[in-house]
Each structure stands twice: as C-alpha cells, then as structure tokens.
C-alpha cells in the first residue's frame, strides 16, 4: 500500500508488469494470521474490499459477479443438490448463494483460518447476509485437504456439489497443494455418484498458463471438464473457473431448463446469473482455449503448479 499526496491506494501486481490500483478511504483490518496476510479496506469505488496475501479477493460492489458465477452453474446443473461442501469462502458469500436453494439440507463451509471467518462475521454482513446463522449451515475450521481426504477415505458422507473458493496457488500459500492431481482424485471420491466439483482457477489475462495447467490436471480425473469465466470489475480481469462432473454436463442444459430450475429451486434475488449468463460463461476467449489445447503439463504433489506463471507457453 502506498500514499501519494495524502491519498491512499491499494495496488495489486497480479503479474510482473501488470498492476491494478484502487483508491481507499481507510483501512478497516490489517492482520497477519497464522496462515495469511489479510487486509480489509474501504475503497472509493467498490466499497469494502478484501485482500489476501496482496491479491484482491472480493469487493462489496461486484462480489456477486464472482460468487454467483462460482455457485450457480454447478448447482443448477445438478439434478437435486442436497449436500454441499464449500472449501474456503471466508466472506460467507458462497454460503449465502448455496443457501438460496430449497433443496439444500446441509451446507458445510470449511476454512483453515478462523481469523478470516471472524473478520467476515464482524465486518462483511453485506456479503454473508447472516448465512452463518442458517440452521442448514455448518462452519468447520480445518485444513480443506485433510477434510476432503476424510470424506474420500469413507469416514464422512459424500457431497452432491463441492465448491472450491480458495486463494490462488501462490508460492508458500496453504492453498497450493489443493490444485494437484492427487488432491483432485480425493475430491472425486468425496462426491456422490452424480456429483459436481467447481473451483476458481486464477485470473486469465494476460497469462492463462496456470489456469490451463489446472484444467489439464482435472481432465485426468473427471470425465466432464468445462472451462468458464466471468469479468469481475474490481479485478479488471476475467476470473477463471472450471466445472467438473461425473455425469451431468452444464452445456447440455437449454435456456428453458435453466430458467425453470431457477424459478423452482431458488429463493431470493439473483443479480447476475440467468440462462444468458450461463451460456456466456462458457464462451471463453480464444487465447485461453489455445493455451488449454497445447498444455501437456499437470500439477502434482511433487511438482505443484503456481500462480502466476509468466508465460503463454504451457511447456514452461
């Protein structure tokens, strides 16, 4: 963070030579926890903004662009999502969106950082909208890798939908080992027979290399893997997601199917997601498709991918 003429700015250098800055009114929280460095600031244009380890996670003004995109394609594609697992999601906004579904009987949110959840509860009611108080919701402070392995090994009941809303796999991040082939196999085993898995998988511009590696890794685990993205204004970038499924394909739903399911399943307002948005999410740019096509690298426990990779060449 730097000051210029008594004006405060938060600056994220997403890639070397690629920065985005937001002017801020004040710093609300600045805390190094056991796991990460959390900043919560009040910005001029985007309201409250959450920053973890130097990367912008969400802002009040446009968080629905991100959270509706990561939640609803998978939830709408599943025939009847009852049990949902959220990995990460410290703002509580993914939990908020999941709980809009009448079919959901149990939503478990697993976050490694109790301080992040406490900050959310204290300062981000505009994002979680009291989702933590819903009787269907459970918050577990635990390592997502350990928790998923427990389900995979049969000690816990499986889930219909697993939503991974974690930080990017940066060097030294606790999230880095949750983007590997071995981990994704545990996720597969933690799903029910017709389960779906969705994850945020890094920003796409100017280098979608990490995204392509994650996509290619998932292709070695799931029979259906779909790349999609949406623009998030506070990132000034495309946020990349990947939807994986054992059985149901999000591209096989027509507009009528999607609109009918929204009406039948959801209680509450949707700000950005509908049948048109669903279709547009999966129309990713050509440079991303090209990078995916030529990628032959996978992320493993011995050689986990990282973000960012400063190359458009997947054979790095």
Image (cartoon, helix red, strand yellow):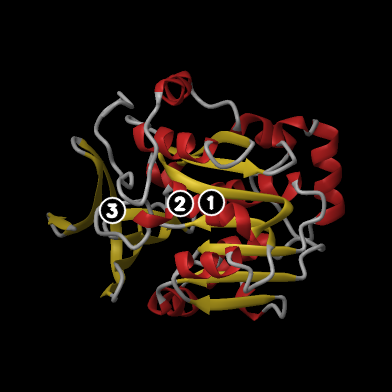
Residue at horizontal 87%, vertical 52%? Answer: 264
**Mark identifier at residue 182:** 2
Query: Looking at the image, is 121 positioned above or below residue 310?
Result: below
Viewer-proximal residue among 29 and 315: 315
Residue 305 point in image, percent of width and height: 33, 44
Q: Which residue is mark 3?
A: 23
Viewer-proximal residue among 283 and 150: 150
Residue 271 in view: yes
Residue at horizontal 51%, vertical 40%? Answer: 218
Q: Secondary structure at mark 3?
A: strand
Residue with the most extreme front position: 153
Residue 271 point in image, percent of width and height: 65, 49
Crowd around label 2: few <14 · some 14–19 · many ≥20 (10 Å): some
The Cα–Cα distance between marks 1 and 3, rounded to whole angstroms, is 42 Å
Viewer-proximal residue among 260 and 80: 80
| Displayed quadrant of residue 152 | bottom right
């Amino acid at each position: 963070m730097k000051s210029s003429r008594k004006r405060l700015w938060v600056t994220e250098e997403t890639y070397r030579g690629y920065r985005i800055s937001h002017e801020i009114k004040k710093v609300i929280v600045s805390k190094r926890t056991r796991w990460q460095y959390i900043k919560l600031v009040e910005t001029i244009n985007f309201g409250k903004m959450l920053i973890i380890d130097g990367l912008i996670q969400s802002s009040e003004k446009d968080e629905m662009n991100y959270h509706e995109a990561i939640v609803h394609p998978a939830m709408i594609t599943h025939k009847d999502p009852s049990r949902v697992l959220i990995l990460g999601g410290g703002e509580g906004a993914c939990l908020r969106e999941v709980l809009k579904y009448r079919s959901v009987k149990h939503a478990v949110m697993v976050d490694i950082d109790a301080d992040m959840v406490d900050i959310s509860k204290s300062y981000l009611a505009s994002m979680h909208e009291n989702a933590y108080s819903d009787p269907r919701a459970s918050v577990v402070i635990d390592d997502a890798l350990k928790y998923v392995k427990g389900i995979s090994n049969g000690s816990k009941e499986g889930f219909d939908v697993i939503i991974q809303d974690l930080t990017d796999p940066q060097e030294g991040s606790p999230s880095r080992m949750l983007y590997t082939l071995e981990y994704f196999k545990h996720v597969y085993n933690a799903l029910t027979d017709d389960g779906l898995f969705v994850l945020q998988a890094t920003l796409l511009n100017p280098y979608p290399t990490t995204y392509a590696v994650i996509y290619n890794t998932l292709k070695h685990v799931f029979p259906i893997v779909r790349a999609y993205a949406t623009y998030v204004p506070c990132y000034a970038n495309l946020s990349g997601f990947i939807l994986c499924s054992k059985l149901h394909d999000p591209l096989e739903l027509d507009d009528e199917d999607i609109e009918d399911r929204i009406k039948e399943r959801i209680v509450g307002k949707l700000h950005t997601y509908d049948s048109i948005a669903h279709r547009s999410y999966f129309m990713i740019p050509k440079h991303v498709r090209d990078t995916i096509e030529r990628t032959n690298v996978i992320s493993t426990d011995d050689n986990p991918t990282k973000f960012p990779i400063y190359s458009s060449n997947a054979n790095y």
